[in-house]
Image (cartoon, rainbow, N blue to C red):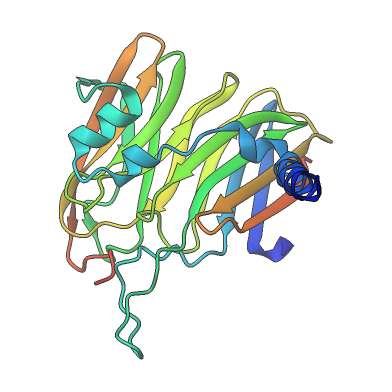
Amino acid sequence: MQKTKRLFLKGSMALLALASLPRALLAAVWPKESFDSTSASGALKALLGTDVTTPSEQIKMKVPEIAENGAVVPVSITTNLENVESISIVVPKNPRPLAASFEIPTGTLPKVSCRIKMGETSDVMAVVKTGSGIFSASREVKVTIGGCGG
Amino acid sequence: MANQIKISAKLKGSVADVKSLMLHPMETGARKDPDTGELVPAHHITQLIFTNNGKQVMVANFSTAVSKNPFFGFSFEGAKAGDTLKVSWVDNKGETAELETQLA
């Protein structure tokens, strides 16, 4: 009886701890498999179900032509494609190509700015998922000093 | 804890332009500690969530490839003065931080 009581208490404490986490933090799943992938193709397949994207001139990217510091490369992406659901940044030559992925709820503009690390000169791909398909744009960023650590 | 995040949110009509800066080492796990020669374990923000008056307006999923002290900017519609904008993040160690501000 005692054993069951203790187990029950332990279980309900765990549940309570989980329930008291801010709701927002429980809402969205971090795409671990996509982030762990060592290939751009693998990352996109895990994230979006496919690695096939349609190049689109409606995606505008602002990245430096030459990154002075590979540890801090500013990337801005905006698009006038409609019904955008997510925008993702993929750096094929990075050890793990998926750098970041942004979920765009209705009412949020399809526009993001952040700073990423690049290990070496590589294309930077902006992948935009919309209600009508998956589109992409790509720009090469030259990196003189790599920013991944090692 | 609040000074781990800085937000600036500017209203342009009903669009809020949000710029945020988070203090975080964003360790990749590939860097060697110069003193010990050991690899510094990965320690990075995994997810950043913004809500406006409780409605989710952005979810940002980060890898270790996001730069140290992440900057993140975005914009959303349907904003007005007095709205409560909240940002919260969680990292791979389960640490969290959050900040609320009123739109003006």
Residue B50 can be seen in this image: no
Of all residues shown, which one is farthest toward the top?
A: A132
- Between A97 and B53, the one lying in front of the other is A97
Q: Quadrant of residue A69?
A: bottom left
Residue B45 locus on image (x, y percent): 51, 54
- Decide if residue A106 is on the left or right side of residue B9: left
- Decide if residue B5 is on the left or right side of residue A9: left
A121 above or below A60?
Answer: below
- Between A30 and A67, the one lying in front of the other is A30
Q: How many numbered marks does the figure carry?
A: 0
B64 above or below A48?
Answer: below
Of all residues shown, which one is farthest toward the front?
A: A1
Residue A64 locus on image (x, y percent): 27, 51
Quadrant of the rendering where the N terminus of chain A is positioned: top right
Q: Please report the residue visible at 17 percent of the width from the left and 59 percent of the height from the top.
A: A120
Quadrant of the rendering where the C terminus of chain A is positioned: bottom left
Q: Please report the residue visible at 41 percent of the width from the left and 20 percent of the height from the top.
A: A80
Q: Quadrant of residue B52?
A: top right
Of all residues shown, which one is farthest toward the bottom?
A: B35
Residue B7 locus on image (x, y percent): 66, 52
- Between A144 and A29, the one lying in front of the other is A29
- Decide if residue A85 is on the left or right side of residue B33: right
Residue B18 locus on image (x, y percent): 61, 42
B76 above or below B68?
Answer: above
- Decide if residue B91 is on the left or right side of residue A31: right
Residue A2 can be seen in this image: yes
Q: Please report the residue visible at 39 percent of the width from the left and 50 percent of the height from the top.
A: B63
